[in-house]
Amino acid sequence: MYAIIIERIGALEGIHKGYQFFMDNKLSVIFIWLISIIITFTIGSIFFVIGQILTLTGIIGLNMIWSLGSSLVIITTIQPLIMVWWTRLYIVKTGKSPYIDDLLDPW
């Protein structure tokens, strides 16, 4: 996905570049993948435990609000952070400039 967007190439060539990127950077990819899973699991577990505590209090509305709020926190903070990490990994490992002005300049 990152190769297609950053390199401005087609889908098949993007798949090839993605596979090649993974083979060249296995350790970095596995490390970010593990960190992403650990963070998501930890935050999700904390939200789950707090939700269970709220369920035990018997206040149904508060539990629903907590569930919605925790989902929004995960969607608006954790997922974008992980996306930035993956994009940054691809840009740095392929030798591209991590600055937006250099990425947008087609020449």
Image: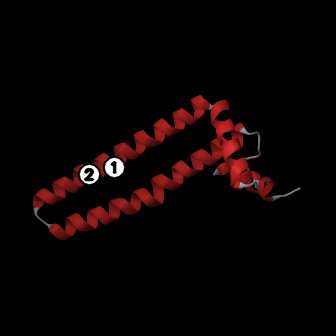
Q: Quadrant of the C terminus?
A: bottom right
Give residue 22's quadrant in the image: top right
Q: Amino acid at mark 1?
A: Gly
Q: Outermost residue toward the bottom?
A: 61
- Which residue is farthest front? 12
**Disc 1, SS:** helix
Q: Is 86 on the left-hand or right-hand side of 107? A: left
Q: Which mark is residue 48?
A: 2
- Do the numbered discs 2 and 1 sit on residues whose CB atoms are within 8 Å? yes
Residue 66 percent coordinates (x, y)? 27, 63
The quadrant where residue 63 appears: bottom left
Q: Position of residue 96 (x, y in %)?
A: 77, 44
- Label 2 amino acid? Phe
Model colouring? secondary structure
Residue at the spot 43% in from the left edge and 41% down from the top edge: 37
The x and y percentages for residue 10 are 73, 55
Dot 2 falls on a residue whose secondary structure is: helix
Callout 2 crowding tier (Cα within 10 Å): few <14, some 14–19, many ≥20: some
Residue of label 1:
44
In space, the residues marked 2 and 1 are separated at their CA atoms by 6 Å
Position of residue 104 in the picture relative to residue 56 (left or right): right
